[in-house]
Amino acid sequence: MVFERKVLKRIFGPTKERDGTWRIKTNDKLDELIRHKNIINHTKAQRLSWFGHLHGMLEERMVKKSIQVETDVNTTTRETKELMGR
């Protein structure tokens, strides 16, 4: 929970007061901004949504090609480690 708050404070940044001073947002204000959602679950849901978007793309799209190459590299690395007994 502490790490989550630090990340949210970094994302939303400080608040500028009417007198020109800056202050850090309170936890209550952060909850209000994210509408009381769990940021970790929200991030996971966004990743799944993006994966679904990628899955529906045409094979010729550069983004889809780069994801497939990255997956192939990770699979090859894992297989190599398994073969070497690590």
Image (cartoon, rainbow, N blue to C red):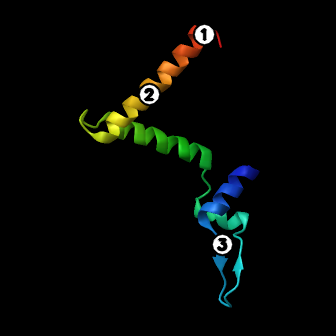
**From this viewpoint, is residue 31 visible?**
no
Q: Is residue 20 above or below residue 43?
A: below
Residue at left offset 39%, top offset 30%: 69
Identity of the amino acid at label 1? Met
Nearer to us of marks 3 and 2 is 2
- The residue under label 3 is 14
Nearer to us of marks 3 and 1 is 1
Classify mark 1: helix, strand or loop: loop
Residue 74, position as x, y percentages in the image: 49, 25
Q: Is residue 6 left or right of residue 35?
A: right
- The residue under label 2 is 71
Q: Is residue 68 left or right of residue 8?
A: left
Q: Residues within 10 Å of mark 1 (few under 14, many from 20)?
A: few
Q: What number is the disc on residue 84?
A: 1
**From this viewpoint, is residue 28 visible?**
yes
Q: CA distance from mark 3 to mark 1?
A: 50 Å
Classify mark 3: helix, strand or loop: loop
Q: Is residue 2 above or below residue 9?
A: above
In-front residue for pair 64/80: 80
Q: Is residue 76 above or below residue 84?
A: below
Identity of the amino acid at label 2? Thr
**Residue at the farthest bottom position:** 19
Q: Is residue 66 left or right of residue 35?
A: left
Where is residue 84, by image quadrant?
A: top right
Q: Residues within 10 Å of mark 2 (few under 14, many from 20)?
A: few
Q: Are marks 3 and 1 in contact (CB under 8 Å)?
A: no
Q: Residues within 10 Å of mark 3 (few under 14, many from 20)?
A: some
Residue 13, position as x, y percentages in the image: 63, 68
- Which numbered disc, 3 or 2, marks the residue that appears first in the sequence? 3
- Which numbered disc, 3 or 1, marks the residue that appears first in the sequence? 3
Residue 23, position as x, y percentages in the image: 72, 76
